[in-house]
Amino acid sequence: MKPKKSLDQFGTFEVFVQSKEGKPFQHEGALHAPNLEMAYVLAKETFTRRFLCVSIYVVDTRDVFVSPTTEGNQSAYDLISGDDGVSEKRTFEIFHLPKRGKQHVHVGTIEAGSPQVAIRQAKDLFGAGKIIYNIWAIEKNKIRFTSAEEKDLWNTLPEKKFRDASDYKGGDKLKGFLTRSQLPDNGNR
Amino acid sequence: MNEPLKELLYKIADDLLILGHRNSEWTGFGPLLEEDIAFSSMAQDKIGQSYVLYQMLNDLGEQAPDTVAFLRNVHQFHNCQLVELPNQEYDFSLVRHFLFDTADALRWDMLTQSSYEPIALLAKKIKGELRYHTLHANTWIKQLGSATQESISKLQHSLEATMPYALGIFEESPYEKEIITEGIFAGEEKLKNRWVAKIESVIAQTQLVLPDWKIITPVLGGRVGQHTGHLQPLLDEMSEVFKIDPGAEW
């Protein structure tokens, strides 16, 4: 197949959601967008139309440093090497995959000159004694955060239960219907 | 005598109901999956906001929300004509969304100061929804208004075609004086001035050019029940299911 033209497909962005104040941000998925700000705008409805949310942030997929992925008793922290070169310190957000098949969860922040060094430092602080299957390090200033004044974007979300199938009690209605159709006495009710 | 207040509530509610319905027609047809979802959610927000306003009117002695939404005749609707225009290509819907939602957000911001407490409370409650609607509109306009020659010329064309209708948003109420002196709402003239400033500041960040305000003739009449031929078919479709069995419980 011919390679696609460069403008044929938008790049991808990773979306992180905080469901409640005090809870860590969790990776929810990715979406296509032409740039970071558009990604933020589209992520809000794509990932937080339903259920609880108090804040989101997004980052270009290319700005996520990804460690090797491990299995069994091996921790990804044991496979990080390289790039000890001296460069200016930046702030990195560190994310853990504590279980295969689950989502990456934010565990903390590290100041370092590279994502590899940040992860090696994160090992003692966040990864000691645990098996972590995959680690992400994202430079903080590459992230489009929710500003303090934008926190009200989700104010009315808890009232939008009509967006959730469970609000329609379909199961109850179906059960009631089946019960009625099995009992001929009640057939006319 | 609640007529001035009721007239204000009706026109805001009718704008939201009709545009909410129009925008919902994009569900399943949006240009990107993510945008389809976002536009549909905002349409749902508008219908939800109109419902609360119809409830407020019900508390003031008007008929139940479903009755006023589905059973009024076309001339009893006080929405501006902008919101009833049929969808065309997406650039038109985006431009309408930008022009209307900018005015809508500013109107609700002014209503946080209303002497009528229920509307002031509602204005504070939905601030976050409106923040998203304008963030969405401004981001798209800035993006496409500076992207390619095609996107810029499409938006420019829609902007020029839509502007006379957008100015119809600010058609004054027969009760304008009472509404202002009673402190219910600071008035269409003030709203329009704030809107012009906001529209200019966003468009200035794009390669789009605003038409000269002085030579645009606003399309009026919507606020007094005069509509284009496009509203009746919309009302027919919107109320089709309701009219099959108005007493049905959902």
Image (tube, rainbow, N blue to C red):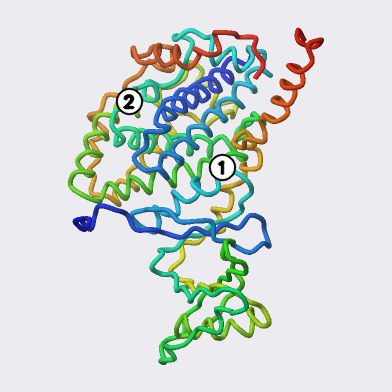
- Which chain hosts label 1? B
User: Is disc 1 placed on a helix, strand or loop?
Assistant: helix
Picture residue at 39% right of the left edge, 21% below the top: B84
Per the image, label 2 sits on a secondary structure element best described as: helix
- Horizontal side of residue B53 vs B238, given as left or right: right
Viewer-proximal residue among B85 and B113: B85
Give the residue drawn at x 22%, y 44%: B152
Mark carried by residue B150 = none
Q: Gap between marks 2 and 1, in whole Å?
A: 25 Å
The chain containing the residue under callout 2 comes to B
Number of numbered discs on residues: 2
Task: Confirm or deny contact between disc 2 and disc 1 (CB under 8 A).
Answer: no
* Upstream in sequence: badge 2 or badge 1: 1
Query: Closer to the camera, B53 or B219?
Result: B53
> Image height check: is B79 above or below B159?
above
B107 lies left or right of A161? left
10 Å crowding of disc 1: few (<14), some (14-19), many (20+):
some
Residue at the image position 43 percent from the left and 13 percent from the top: B224
Q: Amino acid at mark 1?
A: Lys
Q: Position of residue B60 (x, y in %)?
A: 67, 17
In which quadrant is the C terminus of chain B drawn?
top right
Residue A175 is situated, as x and y percent measured from the top left of the image, at 73, 26
Q: Position of residue B87 (x, y in %)?
A: 33, 26
Q: Is residue B85 above or below residue A45?
A: above
Furthest-right residue in this view: A185
Q: Residue tagged by mark 1?
A: B127
Residue B168 position within the rendered picture, expressed as x and y whole percent measured from the top left: 36, 24
| Residue wearing tag 2 | B165
Q: Amino acid at mark 2?
A: Tyr
Q: Quadrant of the N terminus of chain B?
A: top right
* Label 2: few (<14), some (14–19) or many (≥20) C-alpha neighbours in 10 Å: many
Q: Quadrant of residue B247?
A: top right
